[in-house]
Amino acid sequence: MCPTGMETKSLAWEYDAVQRIKVGKTRRFSKQTFEYFLVLDFEATCWDKGDYDKGSSEVIEFPCVLYDVKNNEIVDEFQQYVMPFEKPKLSPFCTNLTGIEQHQVENGVPLKTCLMLFNKWLNKLIKEHKLSFVRQENLKYTGFCTWSDWDLGTCLFRECKRKGIYRPEHFSRWIDVRAIYKDHYARRPHGLLGALTELGLEFEGRQHCGLHDARNTARLVGRMVEDGVYFKLTKDITGKR
Ligand code: AMP
Ligand code: MG
Ligand code: MG
């Protein structure tokens, strides 16, 4: 005897022969133009409010993670400690905030060398994952993501300018995750931690460790993708030197 319609359906479910079309709470990554994000978060020399020895900030930790949007995972990481030259001695405030110790920056490399090492890593990724900073057929569109404009718009921009270091053009366009967050959720989060908490995530690792901040920013981006947030470039300082 042939099974009824209902029986056919339940048999099909049992044998996993039903085409599952996800509706409702699903990852809406198909909407995204970016397939990968390069999420970075610099740590820099800093001082307590009343410190008389204040100077300009220099990058001391340069981390970046490659986040695969579709698979919701970090697929590669870069981390380099950088030696400050203008104020070579870290303030106790800075070590306390970032967890970065004097010996780590003394064993680090100058910013110019760090940019070369980063470039080498980036070129490897470009080849391995077929990445591109411009939208092109058969290539995976990627862009930098940061929490606020400070990393690329202030910190790296000013230090390269002060020191006469060439700043590669790909650092001139990025996505400020904070701006996208504010725009989508219509609220001002209390830092990266606040944004994670508001979306039900816990900060993993140590806050103000650049690599951990970058990883958590990537997790936040992933969570926002789940919410259907559309990511687009928010800043372009191309040509500004
Ligand atoms: P973050 O990515 O939030 O860890 O901050 C990046 C950099 O901003 C730090 O390495 C410091 O140089 C600076 N910074 C962050 N928070 C503070 C603070 N409360 N006081 C002074 N400088 C800070
Ligand atoms: Mg940061
Ligand atoms: Mg940080």
Image (spheres, helix red, strand yellow):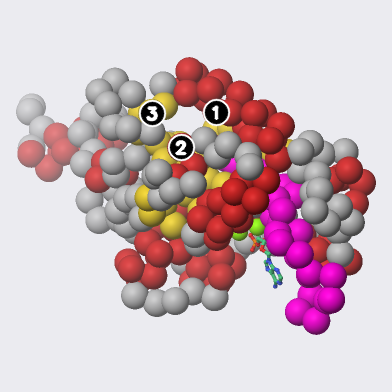
Q: CA distance from mark 1 to mark 3?
A: 11 Å
Residue 64 inside the magenta-drawn segment: yes
Label 1 vs 3, first from the N-terminus: 1
Against 76, residue 224 (above or below) is below
Q: Position of residue 79 (x, y in %)?
A: 69, 39
**Mark drawn on residue 122:** 1
Describe residue 174's horizontal placement relative to residue 81 as left or right: left
Q: Secondary structure at mark 1?
A: helix
Residue at the spot of label 2: 170
Residue at the spot of label 3: 132
Residue contact at pointers 2 and 3, CB within 8 angstroms = no
Q: Say which of 175 and 184 sits in front.
A: 175
Q: Position of residue 171 (x, y in %)?
A: 49, 42
Residue contact at pointers 1 and 2, CB within 8 angstroms = yes
* Residue type (three-letter) at the residue carrying disc 2: His
Look at the image and give the residue range highlighted in magenta: 43-66
Q: Residue at x 49, y 74 (%)?
A: 189
* Residue type (three-letter) at the residue carrying disc 3: Ser
**Mark drawn on residue 188:** none
Q: Position of residue 22 (x, y in %)?
A: 25, 45
Against 8, residue 149 (above or below) is below
